[in-house]
Amino acid sequence: MTLTEKGLTTVDEAVGAGLAAETTALSALNAEQAGQLADLLRELLAGTEETGR
């Protein structure tokens, strides 16, 4: 499967919008909270990799 130029542009815009939304959401956290979130996400990903999901 290959995306057209319009498809590639759409994907780029969607990814950019998603990253902007994440940045906005994460800006509400202080450094300690951001660290806690990062630790929890690492644990979540590790558990997912262990179960093969």
Image (spheres, rainbow, N blue to C red):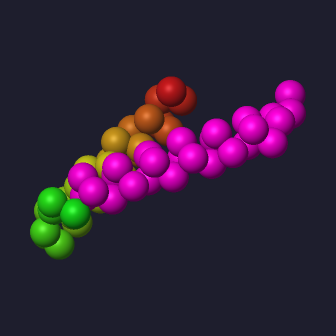
Q: Residue at x 57, y 47 (%)?
A: 13
Is 51 in front, or is 1?
A: 1
Is 52 in front, or is 6?
A: 6
Is any part of residue 39 visible from this angle?
A: no
Is 38 in front, or is 20?
A: 20
Count of number-bearing discs: 0
Residue 8 relative to residue 51: left or right = right
Is any part of residue 3 visible from this angle?
A: yes
**Residue reaching furthest front?**
6
Residue 45 relative to residue 13: left or right = left
Q: Is residue 36 magenta?
A: no
Give residue 15's position: percent from left, percent from top: 54, 47
Q: Residue at x 39, y 55 (%)?
A: 20
Residue 45 relative to residue 29: left or right = right
Residue interval drawn in magenta: 1-26
Image quadrant where one finds the N terminus? top right
Q: Residue at x 63, y 41 (%)?
A: 11
On screen, 40 above or below 44?
below
Give residue 19's position: percent from left, percent from top: 44, 53
Residue 2 relative to residue 20: left or right = right
**Residue reaching furthest bottom?**
31
Give residue 8's position: percent from left, percent from top: 73, 43
On screen, 24 above or below 50?
below
Give residue 7's position: percent from left, percent from top: 73, 36
Give the dominant element type of the magenta stretch: helix, strand or loop: helix
Q: Is residue 20 magenta?
A: yes
Is 1 in front, or is 32?
A: 1
Q: Quadrant of residue 9?
A: top right
On screen, 42 above or below 34?
above
